[in-house]
Image (spheres, rainbow, N blue to C red):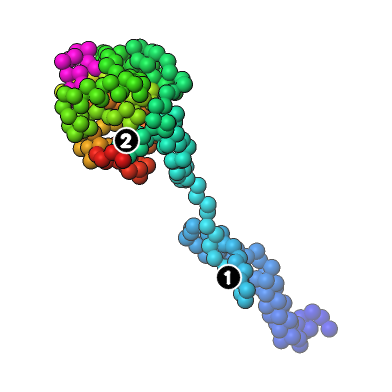
Amino acid sequence: MNLMKLLKLHWKKIVLIAFVIMIVSLIVVIWFKPRTVLSPIIPPTNKVSVKKVETKNQVVVEPEKKSIIKSNSVTVNFDKSKYSTTDSSSIWVVVNKQHPLIPIDYIPNDLISTVGATISSKAKIDFDLMNNAALAEGVNFTIVSSYRSYATQSSIYNNYVASYGQATTDTFSARPGYSEHQTGLTIDFGSSSGAVCNLDDCFGSTNEGKWLASRSWEFGYILRYPSDKQQITGYKSEPWHFRYIGRELSTEMKKLSITTLEEYFNISGGEIYI
């Protein structure tokens, strides 16, 4: 039997086999063809890290917080107890009509002289710096009075009483033992450009008076008897009378806009002697 006869006899089987082969080949090609998988496009987000917080009964997942450290975030309280307000040798001693010096005839043991002033050595460095700063700006203040002893204050006070009477004298002059001058921390300044205003209200309008009123705190001094504080300090305005308390306290009082030691330390004062 030749080939043609075979084909005629079995053509249906041959066609079926060919069809099966074609289908199998197609399946193989499709199955093994490399496939490209496209990932969905996800918009960017801010990634938040989380941390587990364990409680007694459950675990809660919450966003992790970043630590933020702020500079100068800690406020240090000013130490009001650094120096005594009752020790006569302290730069913070409060002397007024309610609080005399102890002992009443106290004499500082560290008095020195500088630029015409007799003062406590505790105040010398800042006093000299203040004087130099003023001179550099063309301001030349003079010294009218600085340290005064108990005996000297007695003489001054008694002379005023003889002239004006005690009631009037007590409004502008301290009794012996109650004077800040006795501490060696106080200076009555004068003006080289307007000496006629020395120990007078007009001193505040002189170049020296204006400079001291605005700048003395930078060097540890304060205007001790402001014009609006007589009921607190016990004395009329004295724009020439400056008291050394140190830079720490003068800066703190300036920052808080407090002008008297009585108010800052909450210490009694007033116009009546004890």
Q: Amino acid at mark 2?
A: Asn
Residue 248 makes an appearance in the image: no
Rounded to the nearest angstrom, the CA distance separating label 1 from label 2 is 65 Å
Residue at 27% from the left image edge and 16% from the top image edge: 144
Q: Position of residue 6 (x, y in %)?
A: 79, 83
The secondary element bearing badge 1 is classed as strand
* Precedes in sequence: disc 1 or disc 2: 1
Left or right: 182 in relation to 64: left
- Name the residue carrying label 1: 60
Residue sitting nearer the eye, 37 or 259: 259
Q: Quadrant of the N terminus?
A: bottom right
Q: Quadrant of the C terminus?
A: top left
Query: Which residues lie in the magenta part?
Result: 190-201
Q: Amino acid at mark 1?
A: Val
Pointer 2 local density, CA inside 10 Å: few below 14, some 14–19, many at least 20: many
- Name the residue carrying label 2: 96
Residue at 71% from the left image edge and 86% from the top image edge: 12
Residue sitting nearer the eye, 77 or 20: 77
Residue 114 makes an appearance in the image: yes
